[in-house]
Amino acid sequence: MELLVVGSVALDTVETPLARREEVLGGSASYFSAAACRFAPVSLVAVVGQDFPASYRTLLAERGVDISGLQTAAGRTFRWSGRYHANMNQRDTLSTELGVFESFAPLLPERVRRSGALFLGNIHPALQLQVLDQVEGVRFVGLDTMNYWIAGTPELLAQVLARVDLLLINEEEARALTGRYSLLAAARTILGRGPRYLVVKRGEYGALLFWQDGVFCVPALLLEQVCDPTGAGDSFAGGFMGFLAQQEDLGPLGLRRAMIHGTVMASFAVEDFSLDGLLQPDAPAIAARGQALLALMQLG
Amino acid sequence: MELLVVGSVALDTVETPLARREEVLGGSASYFSAAACRFAPVSLVAVVGQDFPASYRTLLAERGVDISGLQTAAGRTFRWSGRYHANMNQRDTLSTELGVFESFAPLLPERVRRSGALFLGNIHPALQLQVLDQVEGVRFVGLDTMNYWIAGTPELLAQVLARVDLLLINEEEARALTGRYSLLAAARTILGRGPRYLVVKRGEYGALLFWQDGVFCVPALLLEQVCDPTGAGDSFAGGFMGFLAQQEDLGPLGLRRAMIHGTVMASFAVEDFSLDGLLQPDAPAIAARGQALLALMQLG
């Protein structure tokens, strides 16, 4: 089925201990789309400014991402810059310039309103609700959020949570959302608030999938070198939702298999800057990495 | 086969956000033995002072741990005290009093020198070498160490490393020992220095097993409540080595299965103070937790 993502498209300036990239294509919806398009048709809804490079638009379109919902507004594109520490697990945000993203109002083109799967990227919960009000007959909705909304707009976020199938957040966010330190307790609380599934991302340690009757744990792949961790979580979400949209098995087995594909795409994402790590590997390389991940989990 | 452990026996005073225990039985060899004795016959070689409570000696002996190698020396037993932070992952050491442990010279009773499996707990590498010089016909040797020896006595540690089958350390130690951040690179380096196997412990995230041809990852069990993390790593080692000694499969399949048992025993250890979590569960409870761990790793 078709997959729709609503989120941010940004220009990122990234410094790592080894290199620096200026104003490269970033944002949650960009990473998500680049990962998901390897598995299923993806439409992207986001906003950019008049300064957004045409080459980035082409980059996405050439990969088959439907960018008819990528609005251009008067003003500057959302910009983010950050610097990673030596261990690549910590980063300092150097600047955030919302630009046109500040007044983003997601308007879904007629064509994409009937997408079977929807991913609500990390934007204001009020906007996420607007998106939910525009879709028709959606079969599976995934949701991302962050501490800023968990602390700042809890009632709106609760409304969104009640209307989605899956929440996909990191450990710290799961704890902040529930006030429970044990992930088992946090998961139970979240699954009682609406979603049928919860994915808890743990960075270099992998991710957990919780549902009513079980838990499934996937380790992250071990990499020789991490180039740039930016977008790892969005790439995970893209691989996960893209695989779901391709397979159309929305039960616990399908979601466990989606965890494998999310993990694989996140591992590619961090091996290069911007979307490069997601777009370079061919289908056999993606499949081979899936096999390597299964081997890591194989008892005998 | 029989399993011998040489390490520390201590009196621990532990403070957690919820409770405090004074002078309870602790030390690497105690935790190791209590976990390993659930699977195989264990002999312990360590030293205590004249103040060591007879009840703790009985506790171990009643569980079938051979304590004929537990020397009593003039002076006070090794004491450690620490305080855990709210998240239980960080702790402050409040005091360390080596006592008789400072002049510990491991002398193996005749009976235990021919044990098939040996675990060298975290003690001075010079003492670990003394132990290796006393054993006869040992089939599998596991080794623990810590940053203090990695930084302070690297040449001696290298000599020990060249004579063991397995090194079992945490992520930080693997990086300190090799100067490599990537665990893949660190593992390659360590496997080039002697051991056929490397286990990297990752606390609440589980553990990795590396060998020449592969890597295996086991997640930690998710727990409702962690009571006291003290001894988790030693309990992992005890469950791991105890299972190996029971099964006698010293190939990669046997070691992968041992990872499961190490993880299970570590999960029990942290659910109570001192050795209580290790000694309470019966065989069906241990087996059930092994099944729960396998379910966590089960794709379908």
Image (cartoon, coloured by chain):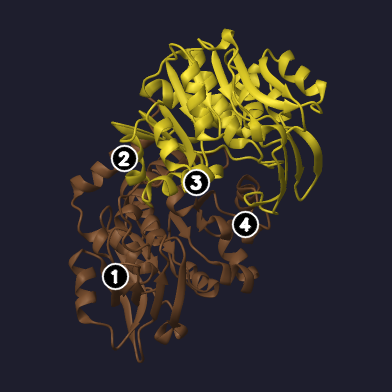
Chain colours: A yellow, B brown
Q: Residue at x 21, y 64 (%)?
A: B64
User: On the same chain: label 2 and label 1?
Assistant: no
> In terms of secondary structure, where does tag 3 sit?
helix
User: On the same chain: label 4 and label 3?
Assistant: no
Q: Residue at x 35, y 28 (%)?
A: A196
**Would you say B125 lies left or right of B219 here?**
right
Camera-nearest label, 4 or 3: 3
**Would you say B17 lies left or right of A260 here?**
left
- Report the amino acid beneath label 4: Arg
> In terms of secondary structure, where does tag 2 sit?
helix
- Report the amino acid beneath label 2: Arg
Q: Are marks 3 and 2 in contact (CB under 8 Å)?
A: no
Using the image, tell me which numbered label, if any, was put on residue A152. 3
- Measure the C-alpha gap from mark 4 to mark 3: 39 Å
Q: Residue at x 23, y 75 (%)?
A: B56
Name the residue that disc number 1 marks. Answer: B19
Q: Are marks 4 and 3 in contact (CB under 8 Å)?
A: no
Name the residue that disc number 4 marks. Answer: B175
Camera-nearest label, 2 or 4: 2
Q: Residue at x 52, y 42 (%)?
A: A146
Which quadrant holds residue A195?
Answer: top left
N-term mark: 3 or 2: 3
N-term mark: 1 or 4: 1
- Report the amino acid beneath label 1: Ala
